[in-house]
Amino acid sequence: MFLQLNHQKLELYKASRFFALECYKAIKQFPPEEKFNIVLQIKRAATSVHLNIAEGASRKSLAERKRFYEISRSSVVEIDAAFDLSEDLGYCSKTNLQDLGEAMIHCFKLLSGIIKN
């Protein structure tokens, strides 16, 4: 926000920011009783995706960067599982979360590519 750093220009950083925002939008429709359960877990994981990308980009060694990106990708998988369960519970439907799904897939692919190289 205040620092003008190179990671803010990365497509991965921008994609993870959009993905986190889509997660926050999607959970607004969840019932209030889930506020401290699945909603909180999705918020934490979505924030983790974005913040680990930022932190990883600042690391000097490739191994360290990749470790942060792996943590970020694991959080994407965690969010996917949380939305699977949320759909089973009737809190959301896949058809209503198309933008979220596309953002998730995009983020996952970018992270997988950067980890592989």
Image: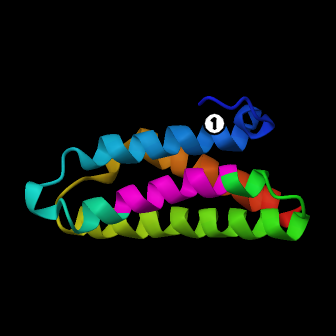
From which residue to which does the magenta span run? Answer: 42-54
Name the side, left or right, on which 86 lies relative to 84. left
Q: Which amino acid does label 1 sit on?
A: Lys
Q: Is residue 8 magenta?
A: no
Where's residue 66, x and y in %? 79, 66
Query: Can you say which quadrant of the picture contains the C terminus?
Result: bottom right
Q: Is residue 103 visible?
A: yes
- Relative height, residue 14 to residue 71 (above, below): above
Where residue 48 appears, as percent x and y from the top left, is 52, 59
Q: Which residue is drawn at 41% across and 41% down?
A: 22
Q: What secondary structure is marked by label 1?
A: helix
Local crowd at mark 1 within 10 Å, few (<14), some, or many (≥20)?
Answer: some
Residue appearing at x 74%, y 70% in the figure? 67
Who's the residue at 62% across and 64% down the image? 73
Q: Main secondary structure of the magenta part?
A: helix
Q: In which quarter of the image is the N terminus?
A: top right
> Can the viewer see residue 96 in this picture?
no
Mark 1 highlights which residue?
14
Viewer-side residue, 64 vs 23: 64
